[in-house]
Amino acid sequence: MYRLQTYAFHLSLAFLILTGSYTFAQEGTNYQDKEKALQTRLIMAQDGDVIEIEEGFYQFKGSLSMDGKKNITIKGQGMDKTILSFKGQITGAEGLKITGGENITLRDFTVQDAKGDCIKTQNIDGISFINIKAEWTNKPNKNNGAYALYPVSCNNVLMDSCVAIGSSDAGVYVGQSKNIIVRNCVAYHNVAGIEIENSINADVYNNHAYNNTGGILVFDLPDLPQKHGRNIRVFDNLIEENNYKNFSPKGNIVNKVPPGTGVMIMATENVEVFHNKIHNNRTASVVIVSYHITEEEIKDQEYNAYPKKIYVHHNDFIRPNRSARKISPFGWLFYFKFGRKVPHIIYDGIPEKNSVDENGRLKASHQICISNNKNGTFANLDAANKFKGLSRDTSLFTCELKSLSPAKVANVND
């Protein structure tokens, strides 16, 4: 009987390789059979294949991986119909990890409760996440994986209609990548709902980030291979009630993000934030800071720690008549300085050397421009001088910058 089953398995596998279509079904005697079958399909996939996973709840004890493939689609039957659970994961750091290759599409399934990141993709030119959910089903805590959806060092990245829940770092995260669109996504119960880090040319729009510690972060950090993140547009998003406690492990940079943050821009160049609804984030709606505000040592000699050419305009701001959340250094600072009247837009006031003219205005290369916002109150903390010159005067920051060009992702239409 064993030989007959083995023969049948290899015969069916050969047929699948020849036809270029794989269908993975829930049937099987135990999780080992299912795990082995799907991993085999990922390893044996030929360029151009579609790997289809039938409706069902699949449990895995180890990571799934695929490397060096081109033009592959991994497809479920729907976000809430095809579920890959790693709740009992023993081996591997990720749920699903895909490395190398070109034009990989993931769509219509959920990954749950990975030991580390739910889905990580790395060094891929053309990666699409479409109608994908990644979540931890327990309450948010520091033991959850860092990233739900995690493309890093990729080019031509599309994240469309995805859901991210419970990450101890960032839910929808794109790092050290180029040419990026993040749209129509929902992120909640993460430390950072959506984060663009050390990346170039990104559009983040039509997303809903709520009940995170921080809604949308645009960061540039030291000690990473790709530096000088730039050309990021954040627009037409609903960013609301991001007041959740910060549950990231100590030592992570996002552990510095104060609960109650709508948008935070750190040390990035050419960032345009516009046409967003940024509502009821108790600490601040938009925070613009240098990396120096973290008080972390900078050893990277090629790193520039200052935000440059930041344009915040035509946003709708609302905040509750309450003080900032007093569970972080920022929260306490804002409580003592502003009480219940915390400004919506806050600049840390740590300028780069020689970036300020004789009138106290940032030079063109470093401008921060704020205009045409609804309820767009502002404060310059003057943190460089221990907050002695804290000011709510907007005159030095009332200006306009040229709008950035849209991000372009290969093979993606508007």
Image (cartoon, rainbow, N blue to C red):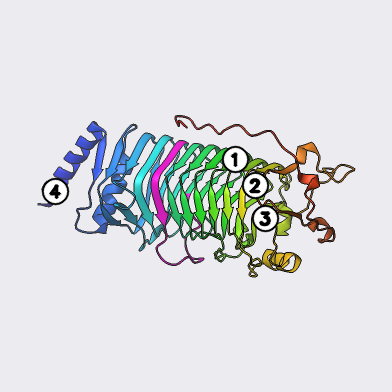
Q: Residues within 10 Å of mark 1 (few under 14, many from 20)?
A: many
Marks 2 and 4, how far apart at CA: 54 Å
Give the mark nearer the N terminus: 1 vs 3.
Answer: 1
**Residue at the right extreme?**
358
x, y percent for residue 140: 47, 65
User: Disc number at residue 233?
Assistant: 1
Residue positioned 81% across, 61% down in the render:
387
Eye-nearest disc, 1 or 3: 3
Eye-nearest disc, 2 or 4: 2
x, y percent for residue 224: 62, 46
Marks 3 and 2, how far apart at CA: 22 Å
Eye-nearest disc, 3 or 2: 3
Eye-nearest disc, 4 or 1: 1
Marks 4 and 1, how far apart at CA: 55 Å
Q: Is residue 138 rendered magenta in the image?
A: yes
Give the mark nearer the N terminus: 4 vs 3.
Answer: 4
Dot 2 amino acid type: Asp
User: Disc number at residue 5?
Assistant: 4
The region drawn magenta spans 126-149
